Amino acid sequence: MPVESSMNPRVIRNILFLLFALPGVAFASWVSRTPIIRDILHVSTAEMGIIIFGLAAGSLVGLLSAGNIISRIGGRAVILRSAILIVSGFVIVGLGTAISLTSIVFAGLVIFGGGYGTAEVALNVEGSAVENQLQKTLLPAFHGSFSMGTLVGVVIGSGATALHIPVVVHFGVLAVMIAAVTFYLYRYLPRDTGKEKDVSTQKVGSNIKLQLAVWKERRILLIGIIVLGMAFAEGAANDWLPLTMVDGYGVDSLTGSYMYGLFVAAMTIGRFTGGFILDKYGRVTVLKGSAVLAAVGIILVIWGQHYFIAGLGVVLWGLGASLGFPVGLSAAGDDPRGAAIRVGAVATIGYIASLVGPPGLGFLGEHVGLLHALVVVLIGVIVAGWISGAAQPIEMKEKKSN
């Protein structure tokens, strides 16, 4: 039976740390088993790319619809439903792999992606609400928890591969774990976070107009551009950094992987320490500083001439890119009224940048080389830093206008 939440916000904060980690564990577990799944399905790398597109397509649908759903039924209910989708999708992917049916795996990834996308928005809405209650910056640390979850997922996936555990068993056990943890913890979250009282009685068409109206708000549009530049920087490193180091500096693949490990470690450190820095110096100052760090890091990677210098650049790049996305989502949720739709809109921009930007970077890299293609990422980071004033807290803006 659901528990009415009169829980201490600090308890809710701790619950959210764990809930943020679960999608990271699931996503990284899937990624870690893609080579064996490709072999079992007997598909080419290009065909595997089409299968993986199911995950991206489902995620985008989830992201685009999450704000509307949260505004109607609240974030807690959406977190539960998204967990059901993630668990169901995971089981279907495992079964499709066991019987070697590509269409089943694709369908499972679409379902998994839908749950993943809606969970990301709902969790960020809940996280933003706890930030406002505690008057303390928490979203960067929540995203750091997601990063820790991905590390756990990689370890689990690598162990399952080393022990030759079938994918269906691996994913089935993980699905049970995610379901058990979520079903136990979601009850302690506030019932109506993100729910708009006047939305539940509106027609679908009028609610769609509300979502479209968000894009006309200058502040949200600028915050979206900030997130676009910083999320693109993060996604570009996730997809291309190892290959960039191998092609651009002639290092071996193992060294390229180590360089990516440096980036992930810097991102995780940046997110877990970001809350303290943000509370001390404020959003705008930190976003400007983050953009400078990321820009200097990317410059060192592009023109460093030696992989040691490029390695320093990778660390600065990771530290600089770590806070753009969570800080942008935090800024979008400043006003509790319409927070779900605004956070959903900004999150959609960020994830589209992460999903669509890197393939475009690869296309450009075919013509000018991956190192020089990073100039586009550099421009995006510079623009994000230039307009970072848009993330200034609403309360401060109101004081200045009085």
Image (cartoon, grey):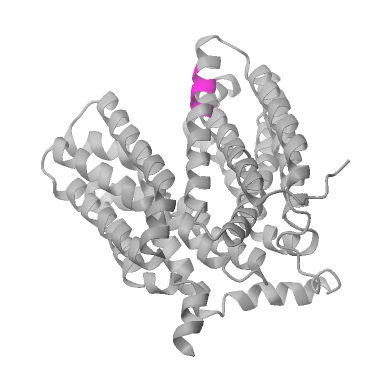
Residue 292 pos. (x, y %): 26, 59
Residue 185 versus residue 296 in the image, above or below:
above
- Where is residue 280, by image quadrant? bottom left
Q: Which residue: 52% across, 31% down?
A: 31
Q: Residue furthest right?
A: 1
User: Which quadrant of the figure contains the N terminus?
Assistant: top right
Q: Magenta residues?
A: 153-158
Which of the pair 401/326 is nearer the observer?
Answer: 401
**Residue 334 drawn at (x, y percent):** 57, 68
Is residue 30 part of the magenta span, yes or no? Answer: no
Q: Residue at x 86, y 72 (%)?
A: 201
Q: Quadrant of residue 193?
A: bottom right
For residue 206, side relative to residue 331 (left or right): right
Is 154 a magenta residue?
yes
Q: Position of residue 169 (x, y in %)?
A: 68, 17
The residue at the point 61 percent across, 55 percent down is 130
Q: Where 51 sits versus 142, above or below?
A: above
Left or right of residue 153, residue 96 in this image = right
Per the picture, the main secondary structure of the magenta-coloured stretch is helix
